[in-house]
Image: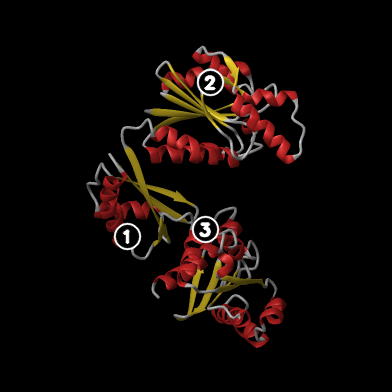
Amino acid sequence: MNAEILSIGTELLLGDIMNTNAAFISRELAALGIGCYYQSVVGDNAGRLEESIKLAFSRADMVITTGGLGPTFDDITKETVAAYFGLEMELHQPSYDHIKSFFERVGRAFTKNNEKQAYMPKGATIFENNRGTAPGLAVEGKGKIAIMMPGPPFEMNSMFTEKVRPFLQARADKIFLSRNIHLFGIGESAAETLLNEAIPNPPQNPTIAPYAKFGEVSLRVTANAQNEQEAQSLLDPVVKEIEALFPKYVYGIDVKNMQSALAQKLLEKNLTIAIAESCTGGLIASRLTEIPGISKSFLCGVTCYSNESKQILLSIDKEIITTHGVVSREVALEMARAVQKISGADIGLAVTGIAGPDGGTPEKPVGLVFIACAGPWGEKVLEANLRRGLSNDRDVIRNMAALSAMNMVLRELNML
């Protein structure tokens, strides 16, 4: 089976919002073993939407749409799909009741046009929306499947996970199971080269696919089998082989991101952390506090951007700053020691650097960053030049410094 993703909304064409829905659905389809060869975007126009749906079905077994399920006159996705399948629209009473109760619950008036969201193509499978008013639905016929979901990502992601994924899994003759190995400190081309040298004839099942994103590389290992146990038995030896191949770079398996991996390890080890940030401006603390439950481990974050704030908030000796410079191994270590002491945390982490675009010298160029941590393992300092020669180097340097700092602590925790 192959699918096409059709994103509906003039706001997408105008660039007012990013099309994160297509990226999410693509990943989910890949995990289910469903090929996706085309993605399209069309505005809220009846004629162009009809053309897009016909074109999508001419080259795909299944079309997955997002958007156009609202109560306004230009929300016409259901009606256009119903016309393609030759189906009449009818009131779906459970959807009507759900929508009406939603409005009563939030204290808003249920206007006549809201009924539109409860009208469905006859015989459609309905996916209740637990995050909003517009139900999703699936229509089957002519050897084709149309799946329609609401446009807001908050609603669509939940609906796909809870309703659409099981719907698709029930129609698959095999299951697809993936493991994601996350690497930091190595580029995609270098990772792929090592993989090709170590595994010159990669297996067809499971498959290994590298994916690059900012600052890291993910290796997705996917197996297809009759059941989960069989798929897992295919995955385990390949995952272990890859772990052994990248011992210095693997920071987590099946984790969402670096901060999730660090938070998980801190909670697992029952250790606390406090952070002092200069050039990253609170970025590390912000990312860690995205994680639910991190309050058990994260005690405090101090953003001490100026030289004076380092002296006042962290009691860094002015003589050390004068002698070594604020961007130095010595100051980074003093910052880590100080934030550990004032917070009572098991681990003190600190970052100081030159994010630019100004402030660099031949001796200390833009991109120079010092990261220090003090913990049960003792004290460590990392020096790195994170400049990439890009127009947005400041953002790159700050984000890479945050990732490098979290990775530094995570590696030390893994050795405890």
Q: Is residue 411 visible to us here?
A: yes
Q: Nearer the viewer, residue 187 or 199?
A: 199
Q: Position of residue 137 (x, y in %)?
A: 53, 27
Question: Which numbered disc covers residue 128?
Answer: none
Percent from the top left, x then y, of residue 206? 28, 45
Q: Quadrant of the N terminus?
A: top left
Tally the numbered discs. 3
Q: Specify whether residue 366 is in view.
A: no
Q: Are marks 1 and 3 in contact (CB under 8 Å)?
A: no
Of residues 326 and 288, the one nearer the viewer is 288
Of mark 1 and mark 3, the one earlier in the sequence is 1
Crowd class of label 1 (few under 14; some 14 to 19; many from 20; radius 10 Å) = some
Q: Which mark is residue 243?
A: 1
Tell me the quadrant of the picture where the C terminus can be found.
bottom left
Percent coordinates x, y for residue 187 in the rendering = 41, 55
Task: Point out the tag, 3 or 2, that comes first from the N-terminus.
Answer: 2
Instruction: Name which residue type carries label 3.
Output: Arg
Give how far across and how far down residue 8 sits, in percent.
59, 28
As measured in the structure, the alpha-carbon distance from the residue carrying label 3 to the one carrying label 2 is 41 Å
Which of the two discs, 1 and 2, labels the residue nearer the N terminus? 2
Q: Mark 3 packing: few (<14 Cα in 10 Å), some, or many (20+)?
A: few
Of 393 and 235, which appears nearest the observer?
A: 235
Q: Which residue is mark 2?
A: 52
Is residue 263 shown left or right of residue 285?
A: left
**Alpha carbon distance from label 1 to label 3:** 28 Å
Q: Residue at x 39, y 18 (%)?
A: 143
How many residues crowd around disc 2 within 10 Å: few (fewer than 14), some, or many (20 or more)? some
Q: Which residue is mark 3?
A: 388
| Label 2 SS | helix
